[in-house]
Image (cartoon, grey):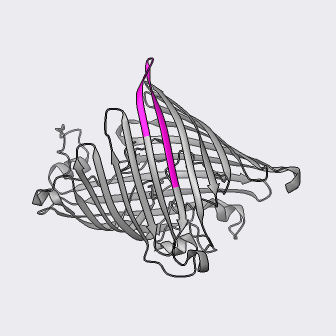
Amino acid sequence: MSLLPSTACWPAFLAGVALVDAGEPAPAPEMNPAEASVFERWEASGFGRVSGKVQSLLMHRDIDGAGHATSGTLAGTLGYRSPEWGGLFVGGQYLYNWLLFEDGCRKVGEPGYWLSNDEFGVLNEAYAGFNFEAVGWSGAELRVGRQVLNYDFAPTYNIRQKDQSYEGIVLTTRPAAGFTLDLGWFHRFSSWSSRDGGPSTWRANFIDVEDRVGVPYGSSGFYFVSAGCKPCEGVDLGFYDFYGDDLFNVSGLKAAWTFGCGRGDLTLRGHWAHQRDVGRMDRDGLGGISSNAIEGGIDYTLEGLTLSTGVVLIRGDDFQTPFRTSFTIDTELLWYTMQFQGDTSSAYLKGVYQWRDWMFYAMYVASDHRGGRLCQEIDLVVKYSFAKGAYTAVKAGYGDRRFPAAMGGGGSNALDLRWFCGWTF
C-alpha cells in the first residue's frame, strides 16, 4: 500500500478534512454558479481554498468498576490554503471544541476524566510552504510549521473532533512515477482530543514530544524518512524510519500484493516494525526497549464489500505508540485489548460494506497476553452521508477482559457509545 500519505482504509474512524495536497492545486471543475457554494466561488475566483467541518459528538462510556460518564461536544473547524506566489504559499486550520454538557466525575482515574472530551481551542495548522514546481522540480513540496500528517508512525488519527497535528518541517517528493520519498522532523505534538489537568498527555495543546513519550529530560524530537513504491501492477512496497533523539528508533517495512480472485480482488499484506531505545532512554527514561511488531493480513474486496482477517504479534518489550500507528487494529474505540504490550498475540476480523449513501463497519479483536490474560473488543459503525457534505454516524464498542486463576480470576468489561452529526465543506 502507498505510504505517503497512507491510504485511508478506515472510512468511518479516520474521516477528516484534507487541507493540503502536494503539488499545484487541481483546477476547479466547471460549476453552475447558481448551485456553487460560497466556498467554491471563492476558490474559483483564485483567492485560495477554504475548507472545514462542523460536528457534534454525543458520547457515553461505562467502565466496569469505575462507573459511567456522558458528554456532548460541538466542534467547528476552519482551514485555509492560499494560492501560490512564485511557489510560496501559507495555510492554517483553527478548531474550537465546545463542551455542551457532561456527567461523571472528572477527577483523575474517574470515568469523566478518561472520557477525554474537555473544551479547547487550538491553532491545529499554521505553516508556510514552497512548491518546487516553480523552479522545475515537479512533485516536491516543503512545509514548515504546524501541520496534519499521515504516516505509519505519525498518523492523522481523527476519531473524535480533531486531527492529530505535528510541529516541524516536512519535504514531500515524487521523484518518479509510482515512487514517493518524504523527509521530515517534528518536535511538538497535538493529540486527537483533550484532558484538562492531571497526568495525561493526551491534550489538544501542543506539547514537546518528550513530554508525550513520558521522559523527564529534553529531546530534539523525531527525524523521519518514509518511502513507497509500486514496482509492478498490484504490488505496493514501503519503508519508514522514525529516529527519536534520546528516545527510541522505529523502523518498518510494508508490502501488499493485490490480484484478481473470482469476481473480486484478494490482497495479501505484511507489516514489520522494530523498535529500540536511543541515547538516554535506557538510563534516564523508560528503560531499555527492544520490540518487534509483526502484522499479516488478507483482504477480499467485491464491489462495495471488503472482508479482512489477520494477526498482530508483539515480541519483546512493550511496543511504544505515543502517536498511534497504522496497524490495522490500532483504531479501537476502547483500546480494551492492550494489543501493544510485550509478548501479546492478537487476531482480528473486519468487514466494511458501502451501499449507496450507507457505510457499515464491524471489527472484532482478541488479544492473548503473557500469563494467559485474554482481552477482546468488538466495534460497530453505521454511517449515512447526506447531500452537500452532511453525515451522521453511530459507533458502538464493547470490551471484555478475562484473567487466569494465577492473576486472581474474574474479569472486567466496558461499553462505548458515540453519535456523530456533521457537515464538511
Give the number of callouts. Answer: 0
228 displayed left or right of 242: left
Task: Look at the magenta stretch and give its main secondary structure.
Answer: strand
Q: Nearer the viewer, residue 54 or 9?
A: 9
Residue 232 pos. (x, y %) = 31, 35
Farthest residue, direction top: 262
114 displayed left or right of 269: right
| Residue 204 on the magenta span | no
Residue 360 pos. (x, y %) = 53, 33
Residue 170 against residue 422 in the figure, above or below: below
- Give me the residue at 27% from left, 55% from top: 50
Residue 28 pos. (x, y %) = 18, 44
Q: Which of 237 and 140 is in front in this view?
A: 237
- Give me the residue at 69% from left, 70% from top: 108
| Residue 259 on the magenta span | yes
Q: What stretch is highlighted in magenta?
A: 256-273
- Give me the residue at 35% from left, 52% from top: 227
Displayed quadrant of residue 46: bottom left
> Where is the N terminus found, in terms of image quarters?
top left
Residue 310 in view: yes
- Give me the residue at 58% from left, 71% from top: 196
149 displayed left or right of 81: right
Q: Which of 401 and 34 is in front in this view?
A: 401
Residue 337 in view: no
Residue 164 against residue 27 in the figure, above or below: below
Q: Nearer the viewer, residue 422 or 307?
A: 307
171 displayed left or right of 70: left
Residue 131 pos. (x, y %) = 19, 59
